[in-house]
Amino acid sequence: MAGCGVIAPNDDGDRDMAMMRYAVLAAAIAMLAGATATTAQAREVTLMTYNVHGLPWPITDDRSVDLRAIGTRLRAMRDAGDQPGIVVLQEAFVDNAKAIGRTAGYRYAAFGPAETAAAIVPRNDDDFVSDGSRLVGERLGKHVDSGLAIFSDYPILAVRRMAYPVCAGYDCLANKGAVAALIAVPGIATPIAVVDTHLNSNTASGAPSPRAIYAYRRQLDLLADFIGSLGAGDRPILVAGDFNVGRDLARRTHFDLRMLGGEASLQTAVASCRIAPRCSVAEPSGMALSIGRGKDWMMYRPSPTVRIRPVALAAPFGQAANGTMLSDHVGVSVRYRIDTRAAPAALITTIASR
């Protein structure tokens, strides 16, 4: 991807984790060299999530015009000084979708699991996987990659990826999973982990409902573990993507259990914004449409040394005046205010010893 600093795929989980620990340690030491333990810092960071419907033909009609338009609009936002500093995409399968970051002028990019990335099936899921039906795309191998992309104006220090070993229906034709990028935001003492994901669809998967919900729950379980492995509570995390919750009660129940509780313990940007004394909402009709669908979520988790709070929501990629959209999803964003204090030496010792 010319024009962007692309992080190459790395399936060695231990090495990825070591890189992330080293990056955090190096950043923390550099931070202490120029700041005292009481130095306060603050920065506003905007993150946008967008399922761009970048599916290949003949699954859908030619998407090249709309995908190029998305990149061009992001470039126009940059020219106006209003671009999101971080963009996470889903269904960026085709080349025109992957090129959005380059078109929009992002210097850094990371992509999710490749088509060939292996995923080890947990033993308790063996029977479920082996019972898959080829009539709805199961047990036919992977035909596209994860479709995940993270574009950033800020340096990406390290990347971790995970392919979901359990899936249902036509979703199995893609190597869906999650990607985490460790991003060094200037002015923020601690690098931030940004996670992008796309979970199994429901009716659209073509699989019977019991199989779709089983795969969905297992993916949430694995995602919660993945998020938990990124910092054990002492690393700030931003999570966004297409969670395919919808209005299904069973899905929402497990989503709340695994994302808002347990190891992940995330907070949703929309809910926090609703109760915040000052949190503006731009393009409210687009935000309402996205919230009502219940698929695209933006969440965060602060750390002992970093406070995160949403200060604005927007829907820069919603419906045009004539009702058309560039995708079948709304592109929504949240502006976070991130306040950080220099980490005490005791915390750095803890990080270095992991």
Image (tube, rainbow, N blue to C red):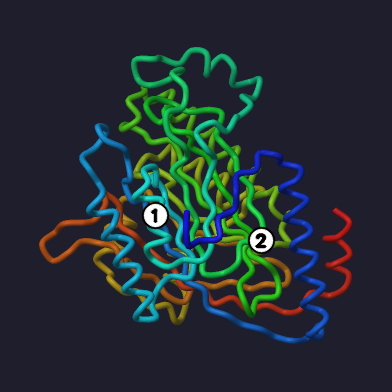
Are the residues flagged by discs 1 and 2 in contact, CB closer than 8 Å? no
Q: Residue furthest left?
A: 322
User: Which is more N-terminal, label 2 or label 1?
Assistant: 1
Q: Residue at x 73, y 69 (%)?
A: 304
Say which element carries label 1: loop
Image coords of residue 150 (percent x, y): 50, 56
Position of 196 relative to 283 (above/below): above
Residue in view at x 38 percent, y 57 percent: 100
**Residue marked by disc 1:** 99
| Residue found at the very far front of the displayed protein | 2
Whole-number angstrom distance, CA of label 1 to CA of label 2: 21 Å
Along the line of sight, the residue nearer the viewer: 165 or 58:
58
In the rendered structure, find residue 129 and report the number of the disc placed on it: none
User: What residue is rendered at 36% in x and 50% in y?
Assistant: 97
Report the residue at 53% width, 78% height from top: 44
Reply above or below: 331 against 91. Answer: below
Q: Which residue is mark 2?
A: 157
- Please provide percent x and percent y for residue 109: 52, 57
Q: Position of residue 202 (x, y in %)?
A: 36, 33
Q: Is residue 331 left or right of residue 347?
A: left
| Left or right, 133 with reference to 24 | left
Say what amino acid the circle numbered 2 marks. Leu
In the figure, is residue 79 to the left or right of 338?
Answer: left
